[in-house]
Image (cartoon, helix red, strand yellow):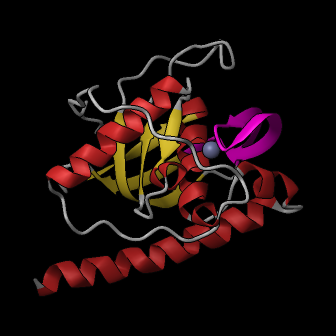
Amino acid sequence: MFRDEKLKDAPAPLPIALHGEAILRQTAIEVRQFDAELTHLAEQMSASMLAAKGVGIAAPQIHSPLAMFIMASRPNDRYPDAPHMAPVVVVNPQILNASSELNAGEEGCLSVPGQRFVIQRHEKIEVRYQNLQGEWQQGELSGFIARIFQHEFDHLQGITLLERSQMPEQQPNLRKEVVQNQVSLKHTAKEGNAQ
Ligand SMILES: [Zn+2]
């Protein structure tokens, strides 16, 4: 399901938005134009993520309102046990299903520097998203990769790690998002048929 997007590493890293900035509190906007500008944004996100030694980054973290993120797990000082994976660009993501099994694990965030939180995430999720060419991808993620997806997905709902860590009932909150996404999925399918 995952296609390695050939991102150039040319652009200079951009400053990362910090918790409290308005861009991190808003719901991201659906991507509709899959063009060179979108690819350039992905390259800027990638460069900024690598410079900050992150394993993922969401567009709002470099001050773009678009619903898009990059997952790029690899072992580093903060996540020594992280699996290696080629960077994946995820556009307009949806969580279709989530396992009832939860995992508690430590997370950090480039927008909440210097802090770590233990966060409950679903062990397995079924996801759907578009790649940089606008092609729909679907598949199941588990473990650390599923954790990154849920973390970045939160960013697109205007939720940072700080808010997530303070949610007393993490499970019901995520379930609510899942239901909302299933509704929007049906909506998208209808739009697709109409075209
Ligand atoms: Zn983050």
Which residue: 57% across, 67% down?
178
Residue at the image point whose x is 54% and y is 49% from the top: 61
Image x and y of residue 27, in percent? 54, 71
One can see residue 195 in this view: yes
Q: How many marks?
A: 0
74 sits left or right of 80 in the view? left
Q: Determine the residue positioned at 43% across, 53% down.
A: 127
Q: Please state the quadrant of the image where ligand 1 appears.
A: top right
Residue projecting furthest to the left: 195
Q: Quadrant of residue 170?
A: bottom right
Against 118, is 173 above or below? below
Q: Locate the C terminus and report the quarter of the image it occupies.
A: bottom left
Q: Position of residue 43 (x, y in %)?
A: 30, 37
Q: Quadrant of residue 171?
A: bottom right
Looking at the image, residue 109 lies above or below residue 191: above
Task: Decide: is 131 above or below 66.
Answer: above
Magenta stretch contains residue 23: no
Q: Horizontally, is 118 left or right of 189 in the view?
A: right
Image quarter where the N terminus lies is top left
Q: Is residue 135 visible?
A: no
Q: In which quarter of the view is residue 106 placed?
A: top right
Q: Which residues are magenta?
A: 101-124
